Image (cartoon, rainbow, N blue to C red):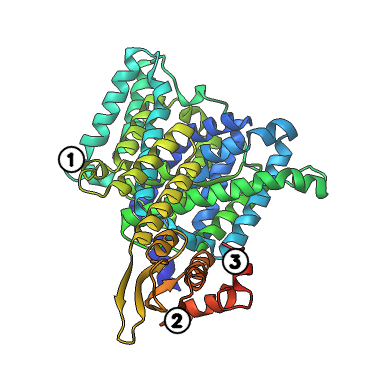
Amino acid sequence: MIGSIKQNWFSNIRNDVLSGLVVALALIPEAIAFSIIAGVDPKVGLYASFSMAVVIALTGGRPAMISAATGAMALLMVTLVRDHGLEYLFAATILTGLLQIAAGYLKLGALMRFVARPVVTGFVNALAILIFMAQLPELTNVTWHVYAMTAVGLGIIYLFPYLPKLGKAVPSPMVCIVVLTAFSMWMGLDIHKVGDMGELPDSLPVFLIPDIPFNLDTLLIILPYSITMAMVGLLESMMTATIVDDLTDTGSDKNKECRGQGCANIVTGFLGGMAGCGMIGQTVINVKSGGRTRLSTMVAGIGLLILVVFLGPWVSQIPMAALVAVMIMVSIGTFNWGSIRDLKRLPLTTNIVMLATVAVVVATDNLAIGVLVGVLLSALFFANKVGRVLHVGASDAADGAREYTVTGQVFFSSTTQFVDAFDFKEAVDRVRIDLTHAHFWDTTAIEALDKVVIKFRREGTDVELIGLNEASATLVDRFAVHDKPDAEKLMGGH
């Protein structure tokens, strides 16, 4: 027990504290921006980012992962806030958490195994593009000072690690933020700062119960939003956890992460925050800055609250150019450049899935839709590929029967090929179909088998099926009609 706590919390203290502080600084403008998207006060997003990070550090299944208010979730709650008000958002956030806890206990986190690697790669690449595009408003219609500050910031981020000893001791993104903030204040530069994005809260969040009618009408109002937010939140969180698994070469408990996200959203709703989920960009900052344990996530949450409530006047002076430099670093580090180099080497279907995921995410600005498209394409390509691995050979048996040997998988994708492989007009008295090396997966396959048998019988041919494995035989017993009375009538006369 003590060993586990030490490993999960205190095995990397210095790097976790420093990386958590970097994340806390980077969270501030994003939380404010997402609050503006949702149509709520900036403190709603800031409180949400604080509570999500702190609670997920305690309850999540993926150490070093950052959860907070996100753009994807903010977009889903715009209509609810506009039509019904802030209190309904808090209630929807709590219900979102309950649904996510239920998903965890139903072990829906295991569904991540159905997300193919090209989908994850496309998701990561699309996210990198979106992170970069989100910085463009800060780099358009601005003075040359902003470009100079951003360039210097990138120089610090990439060159500082090469300094002897000190370069490895302090995360370069933090050095970038501190140096550029000090320089901006010293020179009195008139450039866009964090304080220009919105007013920072000056008090701690307090526990509150949403001021709404507790009746069926309220439930029917918030339930559709909560279901959508729960699904999108879990999808982004599971994808984030998978990416951290890859970056750190460690595993995580996806079902525990589902429950942890639920707990975090429940607490967030009662503290006056908006629903949130895993943040890939901030998580990458954390991992790239050296964060590895739950302590880094806890420091990010508590650090964020301390910064905005107690150090607000200083934090508001941070130039956005410094944070833009950090986020550009994140986008460059997040993008899987190897996927571009491997386009010529990888199969066409793999490239299509990856590129389609990227295109849909960037076009819709919705990570969930892009992943859904990628998963569907992967499934279609897989079904088509497996469906083609089917062979039906014909030969003459010693007893004079025509024997067909079926090898492969028979399911909805391969049934047409299966039926077309038989010669129903051939003048033979008996046909034997050897299914020893075949497997029937669904009712569509059983219907195809019925069609083959009944077509032969119409030609006056006796049909014998041999070699069905147990699983296929069970399906045939339950759903086949060729061995039932009035088989042709049950088949609809075709």
Mark number displayed over residue 491: 3
Q: Which residue is mark 2?
A: 464
Could you say which quadrant of the image residue 289 lies in?
A: top left
Give the class, few, some or many, for how many residues have Cα within 10 Å of label 2's Cα (few <14, many ≥20). few
Q: CA distance from mark 2 to mark 3?
A: 19 Å
Q: Position of residue 288 (x, y in %)?
A: 32, 46
Q: Amino acid at mark 2?
A: Glu
The residue shown at (57%, 30%) is: 37
Task: Return the residue nearer the eye: 415 or 198.
Answer: 415
Q: Would residue 246 be found to the left or right of residue 469 on screen?
A: left
Task: Return the residue nearer the eye: 253 or 182.
Answer: 253
Say which label, 3 or 1, has the lower sequence index: 1
Task: Return the residue nearer the eye: 315 or 342.
Answer: 342
Q: Position of residue 224 (x, y in %)?
A: 68, 45
Element type where label 2 sits in the image: strand
Q: Amino acid at mark 3?
A: Met
Q: CA distance from mark 3 to mark 1?
A: 75 Å
Q: Which residue is mark 1?
A: 162
Give the class, few, some or many, for how many residues have Cα within 10 Å of label 1's Cα (few <14, many ≥20). few
Element type where label 3 sits in the image: loop
Say which label, 2 or 3, has the lower sequence index: 2
Q: Nearer the viewer, mark 2 or mark 1?
A: 2
